[in-house]
Image (spheres, helix red, strand yellow):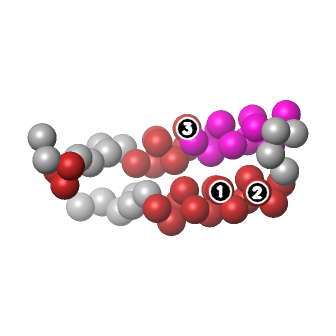
Amino acid sequence: MDDSEVRIDHPERLCDAIIGILDELEAEAVIDEERAAELRSEIYRSVDTTET
């Protein structure tokens, strides 16, 4: 399969899972609140959640 054909069927689920991980890392003080917020923002910007 060509890399250009790779897609995520449910990007909103991926976002939710990654955000859950970030929440846990923040709760355990592995990353600080500011960094967690930056990463959340980056995740939502980089994953296209629009329906095609």
Determine the secondary structure under disc 2.
helix
Q: Closer to the N terminus: mark 1 or mark 3? A: 3
Determine the secondary structure under disc 3.
helix
Q: Depth check: 28 or 11 in front?
A: 28
Q: Identify the residue at image location x=76%, y=38%.
A: 25
Q: Amino acid at mark 3?
A: Ala
Determine the secondary structure under disc 1.
helix
Give the quadrant of residue 39.
bottom right
* Contact? badges 2 and 1 (CB < 8 Å): yes
Q: Identify the residue at image location x=40%, y=48%.
A: 11
Would you name the residue on which mark 2 appears?
35
Q: Which residues are magenta?
A: 18-28
Q: What is the spatial separation of the Cα atoms under label 2 and label 3, in whole angstroms?
A: 17 Å
Most extreme residue toward the left, as rendered? 1
Q: Nearer the viewer, mark 2 or mark 3?
A: 2
Give the quadrant of residue 30.
top right
Would you name the residue on which mark 3 appears?
17
* Residue 15 % position (x, y): 51, 47
Give the quadrant of residue 21.
top right
Q: Identify the residue at image location x=32%, y=45%.
A: 8
